[in-house]
Every structure is written in C-alpha cells, then in structure tokens.
Image (spheres, grey):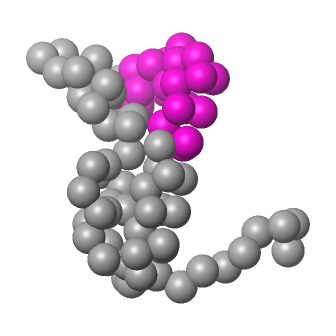
C-alpha cells in the first residue's frame, strides 16, 4: 500500500474539518468583494489564484494539518484546540 497506513477516525471530527484547512482563509480574502458574471468566471479566478501560490504555501498548510491529525490520534480522537 505504498507505505500508507489506514487509521480509524470518527466520521465527523471538528478538529479535522476541511473548513479548517489553510487554503480557505486566504482564498476568501482574495475573492472577497469581487463580482463574477457566472460560475465559469469564478472557477477561472480560483484556478488562477491556486496556480499562483508557491509550493511552500501548500506545504505549510499540509504540515499543519498533519500535526493536528497526529495530535487528535494521540489523544484518542478527543477535541483538539488550535
């Protein structure tokens, strides 16, 4: 399995919710106040913005998420404060 381990976790955990992912805050700030003609325009803007982010931006966010997952697993799935 390519060195990956499958772990059990609760079906919903507020500690690991996708809304906490580092991408959404900066993206919200980027598109805030802008108006788009249609779904295609906003999709184009989002893809453009995502492609402009440096690799370090994504690496930092993934690293932070991994730390939170690890913390949650180590305390048996209990609530993890930021």
Kindly tell me whether residue 38 is visible in this rendering. no
Given residues 11 and 76, the one toward you in this image is 76
Looking at the image, which residue sits at the far left? 33
Res 22 → quadrant: top left
67 relative to 14 in the view: left or right: right
Which corner quadrant holds the N terminus?
bottom right
Q: Residue, x 53% and y 53% (percent of image)?
A: 66
Tell me if residue 21 comes above or below residue 53 in the rendering: below
Magenta span of residues: 42-63
Image height check: is 63 above or below 77? above
Q: Is residue 4 left or right of residue 12?
A: right
**Residue drawn at the location 63% of the way across and 23% of the way down:** 55
Task: Locate residue 38, reporting x and y percent.
Answer: 27, 30
Magenta stretch contains residue 51 = yes
The answer to whether residue 8 shows anywhere in this view is yes
- At which x and y percent is residue 19? 29, 51
Residue 72 horizontal side relative to residue 51, left or right: left
Nearest the eye: 46 or 19: 19
Residue 74 percent location from the top left of the image: 48, 72
| Residue displayed at 53% across by 85% down | 8
15 is higher (above) or lower (below) than 64: below
Q: Is residue 46 magenta?
A: yes
Relative image position of residue 32 (x, y in whole percent) = 17, 21
């Amino acid at each position: 399995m390519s060195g990956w381990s499958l772990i059990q976790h609760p079906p919903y955990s507020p500690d690991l919710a996708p809304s906490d992912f580092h991408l959404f805050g900066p993206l919200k700030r980027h598109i805030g106040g802008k108006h788009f003609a249609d779904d295609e325009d906003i999709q184009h803007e989002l893809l453009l913005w995502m492609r402009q982010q440096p690799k370090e931006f994504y690496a930092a966010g993934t690293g932070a998420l991994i730390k939170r997952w690890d913390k949650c697993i180590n305390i048996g799935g209990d609530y993890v404060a930021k």
